[in-house]
Image (cartoon, rainbow, N blue to C red):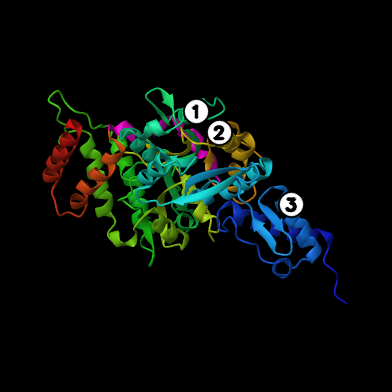
Amino acid sequence: MTSRPSRTTFRQRLDEMVTVLRDDIITGRRDVGDYLPSEVALAEQFQLSKNSVRKGLERLVEEKLIEKVPRVGNRIADPGASGTVLLRFGYYRSVIQEAALDQLIEGFQQAHPHIRVELVPLPYENYPDAVSGYIGHDMLDVATVNYNDFRWLADEGHHELLEPLAPRPELYPFIADCFRHEGRLLGLPLIFSPVMLCYNREHFLAHDLPEPDSSWRWPELMAAAERLGREPGTFGFYFHMLSNNRWPVFLLQSGGRFEPDEAGNVPVCGTKLMEGLRLTRELIDRQSAYPAYLSENDMDAERLFLQGKLSVIIATYFSLNHLKDAPFAFDVAPLPYLNEAKSLLLAIGLIVNRTSAAKEAALELVDYLLSYEAQLHIRQHTFSIPAHKKAAEWNGKEMFPRPSRFSMYREIIPSLRFFTELGLRSADLQHVCNALKLYWSRLEDEQSMCSRLEGLLSDRAAR
């Protein structure tokens, strides 16, 4: 005789059904006016009795997500029909994993049943164009925005679309004001990360190599990478050079800055910046088998690392979320340095549409996402660093294994810089990167590249 499922099992299945249906409705996978599957179909799908299904559906009715239509079924409710406020939230797709965004929205939904959040994924390409267009046409109430894209919005005059926000003393001071423009705080940080090294500890152990630490300079990493790369099918060190979250690191470490002189020209030749640019090409050249076609973006390097084909990559805490299931031990370390021990600082924040018809609800959502409870959820369920200092520094039983040096970021806070430290605007990043491609490919010598880069930046500075 088979044992009957326990009450706990039934409760778990019931909760799963409610969660799945709620998530489908909140994220827009099921449209307003559509009907849910029949109670019989739901009972079969989630292995529940019809009675249990009805109890679960009643919870969704109470949350005003569905309405019962007699003798027809359960219809997804129009949020405006019963005083429910609809919030449209634009976001980077990666933030679902990097900040457990879907789980946070579900928690907000349960705490605020009168507000329905519709998640609107936006394209990575031309994200600032998309978010400014959506907000400008009142198609979004809240959105995520990274520091680079925020600077683009500000540089292009779209900051007027954004609602000024109140400062948050509970956030890390060095990150709390990063979305400030012309004296107004127009965004608040949700998560952040330095750019750092991530390495396969087993590879270092197998080659009897010391693991990287904060004293390493680039020649030490190159030497270690050369030994690690002797293993067939393995590259010692690799990263996606063309990423705007990677190559600026080397210019920051040079100690130089793109600054117009008295004549309005931006000198590059003969400056410290050239030391950083030479290092980028040396890193490529020193990797005897450094095929640029291995990656189209940062995630390709992370995928190869996960497969054990790379020993060391340049990564972020955000990207560690893709390594949760790594079949080997990995750890993190500060980047090696050139002239100055600096690294690039990345931040993803929240902005609010200044003319939103649901501004009060939008601000409630921002409050919720930056609360200690929500930020602690990010700390416990992801590798990302929450902006809330107390939540980020929580010390308790971890839910999954973490690198032994997970808290390393706290040691290097004084060395972290945004790309704007270089004197560049957001739109300049891609122009500079494009100008460097011939140099990196050895199709252009240093002097030609340098002169062309000076001309490009001097023209842009004069506009």
Q: Residue at x 36, y 62 (%)?
A: 230
User: Which is closer to the viewer, label 3 or label 1?
Assistant: 3
Say whether residue 329 is left or right of residue 429: right
Boundaries of the magenta span: 403-423
Q: Secondary structure at mark 1?
A: loop
Name the residue carrying label 3: 59
**Which quadrant of the rendered structure holds the C terminus?**
top left
Earlier sequence position, callout 3 versus callout 1: 3
In the rendered image, the vertical position of residue 414 relative to residue 430, given as above or below = above
**The disc label shown at residue 58, or none:** none
Q: Residue at x 49, y 26 (%)?
A: 173
Q: Report the amino acid beneath label 2.
A: Leu
**Disc 2/disc 1 C-alpha distance (Å):** 9 Å
**Which quadrant of the rendered structure holds the N terminus?**
bottom right
The answer to whether mark 2 and mark 1 are in CB contact below 8 A is yes
Q: Can residue 120 be seen in this snapshot?
A: yes
Q: Report the amino acid beneath label 3.
A: Arg
The overriding secondary structure of the stretch rendered in magenta is helix
Q: Residues within 10 Å of mark 2 (few under 14, many from 20)?
A: some
- Locate residue 104: give its quadrant: top right
Say whether residue 277 is left or right of residue 116: left
Name the residue carrying label 2: 363
Name the residue carrying label 1: 165
Q: Residue furthest right?
A: 1
